[in-house]
Amino acid sequence: MLIRLLTFIRRSLQRVRVSRELDEELQHHVAMEEQQHAARGVPPVEARRRALRDLGGIEQTKEAVRDVRASWVDSLWQDLRYASRTVWRHPGETATIVAMLALGIGLTTAMFTVVDVLILRPVPFQQADQLAMLWMRGPTGGRTTVRPSVLHAWRESGVLTAAEAANPDTALIEVGSMFATRGMARVTPGIFAMLGGVQPDRGRLFDSTDGGAGADDRVLLSADVWRTLYRSDPLIVGQRITVNSESLLVVGVLPAGFRFPAWDTQLWRADAFSGNGGSPEILPRVYVRFAPGITRDDALRVALAAAHAADSNTAKQWPQAEPLVRSDDYYTRAVPVFAASVLFVLAILCANASGLMLGRLSSRQREFAMQTALGAARYRLIRQTLLESCLIGAIATGVGAFLAWALVGLSHGFLPEATLVRTLSPLSINVRTLVATSVIGVAAALLTGMLPAWLGTRVQANASMRVSERSSTETREAKWLTRTLLIGEVALACTLLAGATVLVRSFMNLTRVNRGLDASGITVADLSLPTAVVTEPTARMVISQDVERRVRALPGVQHVAWSRGTPPVGGSFSVGDWIAEGGQTVSLEVRHYAVGPDFLKQFGIPLLAGRNFISNDGVDIVIVGERFGQLLWPKLDPVGRTFRFAKRQYQVVGVAREVQLPTLDARLDAPEFYYPFVDAGGFSSLSITCAEPCANEAQIRHTLASTHPAIRVSGVRTLEAQFREQLARPRAAAALASVFGVIAVLAAAGGLFSVLTNAVSRRRKEFGVRTALGASPANIRGLVLRDGLTVSGVGIVIGAIAAAALAYPLASLQYGVVITDPVNGLLVFSVMAFTGILACWRPAAQAVRADPSRLLRED
């Protein structure tokens, strides 16, 4: 009843519209005829009467014209109703096709979201190509911060639209008796205007007075912090909160999707970086927007002159402009590979769905033949079947969008740092994603329905009417198409499985790398004790001793050691020529750490030769790692030898075991050496070895921050977490590749199973005849197995050739294994062969169970 009511309403509205159009056309013709009669001198009233008489035929044919104009709409509506009934006539098959397409659409949409935020749009701000981080670089490296005088000089240079500062940091937030650690940044008030388009959800942004003397306690919160820690308090603006043991005034709440300068920044504190208020000991990290109409090279030349005039320490340095999000070689290599993998999976699932659609249409040959005999044109049949595909595609698109939303939400909890650290755009479903989902859904529907619609509706009415539906067979074209699709599915599945095997084995190899140290139970706290605030070395020593005493009093603490940075990725790095006396001159990047006498023992780094540091060693006494020593003095003992870098000379007193970083980027695993730790001034690291139970990171941070007002804690985390961070992306790659490989294999197996099952149901009479003529069950089973395994074998061969072509794109993602490894080939072949046999076995068993006497009695 509802469908009939909707049909009546639609037709009524259509007739009203057509009638209105025809009325307008009639009035136009009447006016034209009336003008012609008036031009001959006929009075106006008589001219009107004659015009209506001459055009009276239009009124008589008006209804016929209306029906002609509305007929194609009615026809389309009928086809749509027929297609909707046909779709739900076999709900099981429809659900299977929808599930396959939805899975492909969901995976593709989720991958598009990742590609969008990592590669296509990592910086979501206005005119992002004009934004950059600007710092001064020297021949041997440099710091990413500059003096406030340089910041102000760049503001006045005239080649920059804006120059602001934003230093990433971390914050310990106190809410009642609870402590929480969140990312924080000290920013100049104009940073949000420079980025453009930033609007607060509540309150206001910083104004020009915030961050200066008397106004250095202003803070902005992210909506995430406001909701989770302060339970969406509507009166949060204007309240004071405790951050790093300081009372700060909340002036506004920013949207949850805003992130800058780091992906995890959730608090922003105003800091003028002028020496008047704020934190004079913190050097600003400068972000700029280049002025339009000025080339980048010209702007950098002016910035160079301004920096040299403002700070004499930059005399031998030059400005370095970097994008807000640094390019990551791993993502540049990995994301396109996985995007292609997702497209392969989508192609497999679409091919599988297309095969099911073709089988579904092939079983309707009598129906199509009857429609053709009654006068239906073939284009009408094709339109009906395409509408079925479109309806299925529309349902699959909706389900796929929901699946993509779930997958994106899962990625936040699965590997947040590995997927978000290289982007400032929030990883979420947005308008761009929904548009992409719609496009993907349309493409999937067309890929699924075009060939089945063309081949499935190709019927011969007389021949099809004579054949019973039960004994109908596929056309030659349909059979070749289904087999070709299956071969393609198996080949793609084999290729994806080979790539997944390489990535999984690479990850396993990385986890087994000998690190060269023992990271168990070690927590590293990065802190600073500014020499501008505590100027006397004696006072800094007293403070550092007090810090040690308080930390040792925490539960479970066994050892404490000072250093400047810790392996594997901390410390300082220098790039240039290292000149060894009696050895070689090598140009490379080297990491170096200032450590105390107990540092190597605490980290489980054994001395292989020489001695450890003693109390009177100066900073020119070093202990080198194995690799650094071998590079400078191949096949020689480094102990007792010296080397020079820049204008300094160092003497080697020991050789320590090499610390290795499990990474795919060899540049990150640089050689290292150690020199004595002298003073806790500036930035330092405190390594804490704990036994269970141990104080948590929030307790350690609170203890350090409360020791002295000048101490700033920038981060506390376990050493094991630093190694896990390096393994996060390879682990994500292995997991994604495994998921894609499993889906591809199961889809290919499902397609083979469904096609063989359908073929067996169509060939039941043939099997009955063969059995009646003496064919054994083994012969019948062999026919089906031969058909399925031939398809699988051809697909595996093609897939093996295609997998070999993956050697180049996977070269930078693999570690200790190659795709042409015989072990890989054996694993892939075993899995594909076993899966193919399983997919063929049940249809073969169904063929054997055919009853000849019953089948031969069927029509």
Image: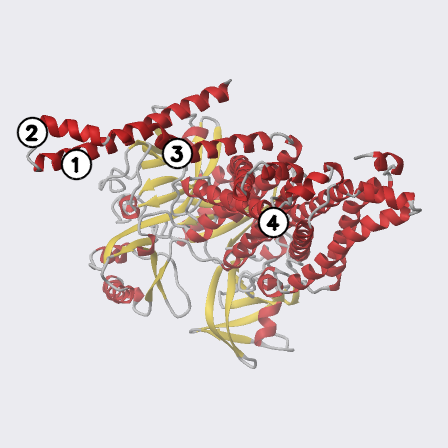
Of the numbered discs 4 and 2, the one sitting upstream in the chain is 2
Which one is in front, 160 or 45? 45
> 220 left or right of 77?
left
Of the numbered discs 2 and 1, the one sitting upstream in the chain is 1
**Marks 4/1: CA–CA distance:** 64 Å
Q: In this picture, is 69 found above or below 118?
A: above
Of the numbered discs 3 and 2, the one sitting upstream in the chain is 2
In front: label 2 or label 1 = 2
At mark 1, the secondary structure is helix
**Residue pictured at 58% horizontal, 67% vertical:** 624
- Residue neighbourhood size for the residue with mark 2, other residues' Cα within 10 Å, grouped as few (<14), some (14–19), many (≥20): few
User: Hey, which residue is sitting farthest top in the picture?
Assistant: 1
Q: Where is mark 1, residue-wise?
A: 32
Disc marking residue 345: 4
Which one is in front, 331 or 645? 331
**Marks 3/4: CA–CA distance:** 46 Å
Q: Amino acid at mark 4?
A: Val
**Marks 2/1: CA–CA distance:** 15 Å
**Residue pictured at 60% horizontal, 61% vertical:** 810
In front: label 3 or label 2 = 2
Disc marking residue 43: 2
Check if mark 2's residue and mark 1's residue have beta carbons within 8 Å.
Answer: no
At mark 4, the secondary structure is helix
**Marks 3/2: CA–CA distance:** 38 Å
